[in-house]
Image (tube, coloured by chain):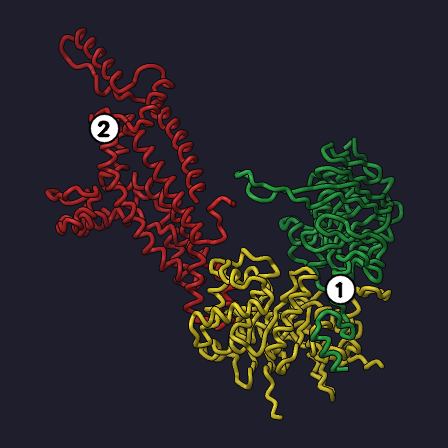
Chain colours: A yellow, B red, C green
Amino acid sequence: MIDTPLLEVNDLSVRFGSVAAVSSVSFTVRSGEVFGVVGESGAGKSATAKAIIGLLPQSARVEGSVRFRGEEIRGASDATLRKVRGAGIGYVFQDALTALDPVRKIGVQLIESLQIHKDVSRKEAAKVAEDLLGEVQIKDPARCMSSFPHQLSGGMRQRVVIAAALIADPALIIADEVTSALDVTVQRRVLDLLLKVCADRGAAVIMITHDLGVVAQTCDRVAVLYGGIVAEEADVFDLFDAPRHPYTKALLQSMPRIGEDVPFVPIPGSAIQVVGKLHSCPFAGRCSYATQECLVDVPPVTTEEDGRQYRCVHALEPVS
Amino acid sequence: MTKFVLKRLAHTVIVLLGVSVMVFFLIRYLPGDPLDVLFTQGSGDEVTAADDLAEGRRRFAEGIGMVGSLPSQYLNFLSEIVQGDLGTSIFRRIPVSTLIATTLPLTLQLAIAGQIVNILLSLPLGIVGALKQNSIWDRGGTAFALIGTAMPNFWQGIMLILIFAVWWPILPVSGVMDLGLSVEHITGIPIVDAFVTGNWPAFWSIIRHLILPAITLGASASLVRILRSSLLEVKHQDFMDAYRARGLRERSVTSHMMRNALPTTVVIFGIRLGAIIGGSVVVETVFAYQGMGWLLINAINQRDYPLIQGIVLTFTVFTVLANLLSDIVHGWLDPRVKVEAKT
Amino acid sequence: MSENPPRTELMGSSEFTNHHLGRTLEVRNLVKSFKVGSESFGKAERIKAVDDVSLFVPAGTTMGLVGESGSGKSTIARLICRLLEPDSGQVLVDGDEVTAGTKIPKGYARKVQIVFQDPTASLNPRWKVRRLVAEGIRVHGLRSRSETKERVAELVSLVGLPEHALDRYPHEFSGGQRQRIAIARALAVEPEVLVLDEPVSALDVSVQAQILVLLQELQAASGLTYLLIAHDLAVVERFCDEVAVIESGRIVEAGDPEIIHSRPEHPYTKALVEAHPVPDPHERTMYVHAQDKAEVAE
């Protein structure tokens, strides 16, 4: 079948003043899949996500291409962007408390968000909103509709934020560290729910997280970001079983795991902030495999037969 | 809600009590005695005159309750207030309540006009400043507000008089309206009365007389900085981006931003309202605007104790009411604020 | 100064060595409740944040306290350090007894140190590292001026920071490095018990491991006693000698770390373990439909 990817990010770069937050990032997201973007602080995860729907502050300089269903949306007109936002791509914010307008009722906010995109009456919109709140497992949707955000618990608010992102039925959901602030048991329920409603609607998800556990549990494919570049992109099983990039391997080894007696090995140093143009492998300074070669330029992208990609001149051999 | 208002009104009584103590005793410790002014020895048969004067003074003092120890005088004063009697002006021989009733409307008229100027200046400057942060408009507006706040009111007033009434005489120097004009007394507020009775010459004259004092009161654009900072606080919250991410127009996003900045602004506005009533004392004196502030300065100069007390207490009531009102409106605008006691 | 002679006899060597052994930490029947609701209308209610908690941490070992937010684990940390006054109960450090309502014994504040989750908030931004680390030594009158200077340099290198770090301000460091400064500051007063309140949860995964390894090394060298408060089951399981699971202010299960890994008995512990996202796609246990996908993929 002639398969246009749902989202194509090509050579995306984001700069804040002299700081290069994202340097030439490319990846594609297919319909219905859960695509993980994982990295530590400063890796460029959030800047990438915000750049996709054009939510970066005006001070940010964005270059490259973002195509949604084949249409270029990077630098597109306000009208085009407004159509994509909400109805094409939904965005779930990290902090549910601040992601909802504190002085307006939940129902009003949901109805407004639907009516922008769909020509429906207020009554119909209210019905859709109420059904959706039920779908995200809010016990008393009618009461929730007439509540203010501060009257809900943390887990409930996160559900409402998910509902707000889903209300206009987007084909792609960007989930930006949605569960980082939640307790594990709540995190589990919220993630479970997010994946379920997205799967029910056939919506793809970009799961942005720093938590490899969440990635392993939820994603189909993963891009590992470091210093603003995609260090490695692979199927989730391949990535965890046989990382090709030394950073991926080091990251996996630095995690304590329940019930395994292998010692966890820290990565020396700390995450870097790229100032000016990137001229070397950003991980070189912390990498035990690094040689002079790594400092000459950003390693080129190597693509394997199965579509797996990495940027490293000392790629690790696949283990059997 | 009722419980909250009652509680606050109870607080008001305590505040009033404190203020009454302060004003009562402080003015009596000021040098100068009003009775000395009234009963100065003249020429003639000095002995008799002096006796007469002393006798007259004694009787007069008795009449206005200025005999006995200060604490007992205070208690008398308090019991009269409770009965709704603010006393009689020593020099004018008119009940204090009547004097306040005639001057208060003028002060209110001026304070409201001042706040209108303030809002007209602050709204655009604050909003443009927040939307186009660090632009030339933002910096200019902030600088304007800073200068306005830093310049003393009386100086500003004198400068305005100099420019617009003396050098370039397009506006009157002082007073409430031109001589020879009068308005029928309906509400007591001249501009309203002139308007309802269709007395247009008086109406325009009142407006012309209001312009300079109102600008003096309101030009500090005291709301600019608070409006700008509360808008900026909202501007950087996630839900603004969340609105955009759902496809809202920038215009709607901005209006939601305003709605969120409103509660804080209203509270500050309420607090400022009290201050602006106080500020009218200076402005009324500069412009010889015969409101309550002007009357207060006169009363202080004459050591007219009952009048001073009455006016200060009235100012206090208005300040406290303005704060109470702004708190109620705050609770009504911001659902996170619980005005009501939890049930 | 004369009352607190320099403890050179204990910490005289230039290395942080076995001269300094940690002491036991014991908590008996600790209770702490807080008021909730509006006081002025007589509707105030008290909820128990810590409800009859007892713990025993042998010298030189690590006890992990695991629970979710609001479980009372941070309150326990603050009660032990006497940043909060308990309603009742006792804390014993090395025989020094701190009972609710009594005066804190002299030197107790030095013996028990705390490392907070957010090093940014817990370090005075206007002080250089040198002063931050030296402050405790000065306050407790532990050393002379020249000795202090030496000791501070020693501590900074002990926690793995370069020497030039001494003349920098906290904001010039990364999160992990700031946590190292906080640890150096805690160690400066030669404590016997270190209460670690979520010391790594604000840090990146790769840096978390650095701090955990540093803490392990410090314990091996000095025999410090740790109480590690965390919400990450994996960290607790791998780092601690014993584990206590806390829910709504009560310890519901305690024992060796096995209770997390293979033998959780209490339903709450089970729920925590089940919710923990295992970093292995072959062990997709949590998300039902994700598991379906995994099966299809296999």
Q: Which mark is residue A225?
A: none
Quadrant housing the N terminus of chain B:
top left
User: Image quarter for residue B141?
Assistant: bottom left
Say which quarter of the image contains residue C277.
bottom right
Which residue sits furthest top? B47
B82 displayed left or right of B43: right
Q: Chain of mark 1?
A: C
Residue B321's x, y, as percent?
37, 41
- Give residue C185's position: percent from left, percent from top: 74, 48
Residue farthest to the bottom, as pictured: A1
Residue placed at 76% from the left, 35% from the top? Answer: C99
Can you give x and y, in whole percent of width and height, for residue C195 in the image? Answer: 76, 48
- State the image coordinates of residue B57 (x, y, percent, origin top left): 23, 15
The residue lying toward the viewer, choosing from A319 and A69, is A69
Would residue B166 be seen by someone viewing this image from the given angle?
A: no
Q: Which residue is mark 2?
A: B95
In the rendered image, the residue lying farthest to the right is C18
The answer to whether residue B158 is above or below residue A210 is: above
Q: Amino acid at mark 1?
A: Glu
* Chain ID at mark 2: B
Question: Which numbered circle lies on residue C274?
Answer: 1
From the viewer's side, name the closer residue of B166 and B97.
Answer: B97
Q: Quadrant of residue A291?
A: bottom right
Judged from the image, the secondary structure of the residue bearing numbered disc 2 is loop
Q: Residues within 10 Å of mark 2 (few under 14, many from 20)?
A: some
Asked if labels 1 and 2 touch by Cβ distance under 8 angstroms, the answer is no
Q: Is residue A98 above or below residue C47?
A: below
Which SS class for mark 1? helix
Q: Is residue A201 visible?
A: yes
Give the amino acid at mark 2: Pro
Query: Distance between the Cα atoms at labels 2 and 1?
Result: 81 Å
